[in-house]
Image (cartoon, coloured by chain):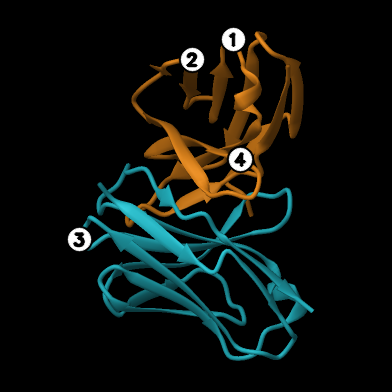
Amino acid sequence: SQQGEEDPQALSIQEGENATMNCSYKTSINNLQWYRQNSGRGLVHLILIRSNEREKHSGRLRVTLDTSKKSSSLLITASRAADTASYFCATDKAAGNKLTFGGGTRVLVKP
Amino acid sequence: SQTIHQWPATLVQPVGSPLSLECTVEGTSNPNLYWYRQAAGRGLQLLFYSVGIGQISSEVPQNLSASRPQDRQFILSSKKLLLSDSGFYLCAWTEGGAGQPQHFGDGTRLSIL
């Protein structure tokens, strides 16, 4: 079963708008990571937030983590057409750095 | 810098035929290596991972096997493919230790006819 579940499954916005997606998980984690996947390509790591962190920024990306609610959010500000992709959260809860991925959010940014 | 190579990019195979997908990593030593499968429009399912040469952990029972004959080489195999083996196969590596990001190859699109 999936440890992380993203919400919404799909998101369509206009260029310049913000895109927000959420991830919920079920068990305690060491860290939570967000990845991006362009159609037909491999995943690219975006940002990692540790269980003792609440918020992290990287460029136009902002990630929050609420361990009490077992949830995380990814915000992409001032979206661009090039941000069109699927976004996945992944949790790391055991030794060996095994990640458990959610089902992803498909984001379409219309120019 | 580190790079990961995965091939072939696309593969069409008949049911019952064998399979060998290869993944190699350059620019790092003793990486953790992973094989994932992704169904269309879905998340990734971890199939196998390896923390060293000859060390393979299987996550789900299935028709596939993995081997790591060299430090930076990871091979996914099957003796007889099933229709249900169709999918997008991704290889990834990470440095050892918890909390490291994974770096992915560009995947192999496998279609079984």
Chain in cyan? B
Q: Which mark is residue A38?
A: 4
Residue for badge 3:
B29
Identify residue type, mark 1: Ala
**B16 is higher (above) or lower (below) than B3:** below
Looking at this view, is A29 or A64 the one in front? A64
Q: Name the residue under label 1.
A: A78
Find out whether the residues at labels 1 and 2 contact each other: C-beta distance under 8 Å. Answer: yes
Q: Which residue is drawn at 43% across and 76% down?
A: B75
Label 2, residues with CA under 10 Å away: few <14, some 14-19, many ≥20: few
| Badge 1 vs badge 3, beta-carbon distance below 8 Å | no
**Marks 3 and 2 close (CB-CB < 8 Å):** no
Chain ID at mark 3: B
Q: Colour of chain A?
A: orange
Residue displayed at 73% across by 16% down = A111
Determine the secondary structure under disc 4.
loop
Q: Which of B94 and A94 is in front in this view?
A: B94
Residue A26 in the image: state x and y as whole percent. 57, 41
Where is mark 2, residue-wise? A60
In the image, residue B22 lies at what x, y percent? 45, 73
Report helix, strand or loop for mark 2.
loop
| Residue type at numbered disc 3 | Ser
Percent coordinates x, y for residue A109 in the rendering: 71, 22
N-terminal of the pair, mark 1 or mark 2, is 2
**CB-based contact (under 8 Å), mark 4 and mark 1:** no
Against A5, is B55 above or below? below
Residue A29 found in image quarter: top left
